[in-house]
Amino acid sequence: MIDYSLKALTADELSFKVNHIKATPDTKFEIKPMFTRQIRQANENPKVNIVILECKIESTEEAPKPFDLKARFVGVFEVNNMTTDEDKRIFAINATETMFPYLRAAVTNLTADALINPLTLPVVPGSTLFPEDRGPNQYTLNFGPTNVVN
């Protein structure tokens, strides 16, 4: 059974930019945050895993948004007894559940500090945020040598 603990958590990047777009007062914008996650093992100590969790909202020509937002957090975890792919899957889900509340709060605070209606992300289980975590046969997270942090 895997055992993990969060050793450090840092807001690596927090940014908010207003997009000056012309819209009528009754215009509705569809705000769909995009989430990404990367997990890497440290070279010097395979028990140390770095998890990068990011939320982005970006305006495009096809889907204009009133603002761009980026919040990226880096978590450092000490992990013991992670030997199988299923252990890696469980760790990825648990690390996401551990870090997501901080990411969620940052998104709310960034929008509130920008003096717009605060955007509050829903409370979701870590196993539903990323499609690859929703079933044991769909797990595709790569812990290979190309994802190693020096």
Image (cartoon, helix red, strand yellow):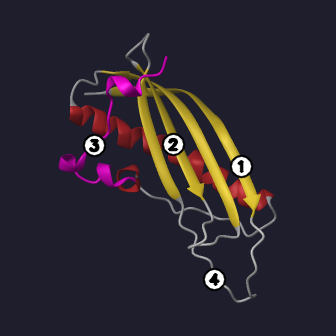
Answer left or right for 78 relative to 81: right
Residue 65 vertical placement versus 54 (above, below): below
> Do the CB atoms of the residues marked 4 and 1 lie less than 8 Å apart?
no
Q: Amino acid at mark 2?
A: Leu
Q: CA distance from mark 4 to mark 1?
A: 23 Å
Residue sitting at x 65%, y 38%: 11
Residue sitting at x 59%, y 45%: 102
Circle nearer the N terminus (2, 1): 1
Q: Amino acid at mark 1?
A: Ser
Magenta stretch: includes residue 111? no
Q: CA distance from mark 2 to mark 3?
A: 16 Å
Q: Nearer the viewer, residue 11 or 125?
A: 11
Q: CA distance from mark 2 to mark 1?
A: 15 Å
Measured as percent of width and height from the top left, residue 114 is found at 80, 60
The disc label shown at residue 28, or none = 4
> Do the CB atoms of the residues marked 3 and 1 lie less than 8 Å apart?
no
> Do the CB atoms of the residues marked 4 and 3 lie less than 8 Å apart?
no
Residue 95 vertical placement versus 144 (above, below): below
Measured as percent of width and height from the top left, residue 32 is found at 53, 66
Q: Amino acid at mark 3?
A: Thr
Measured as percent of width and height from the top left, residue 86 is found at 22, 36
Residue sitting at x 72%, y 60%: 111
Circle nearer the N terminus (4, 2): 4
Residue under label 3 = 140
Mark in front: 2 vs 3: 3
The disc label shown at residue 53, or none = 2
| Residue reaching furthest to the left | 137
Circle nearer the N terminus (2, 3): 2
Residue under label 1 = 15
Q: Give the extent of the magenta segment.
A: 130-150
Indicate the quadrant where residue 97 lies.
top left
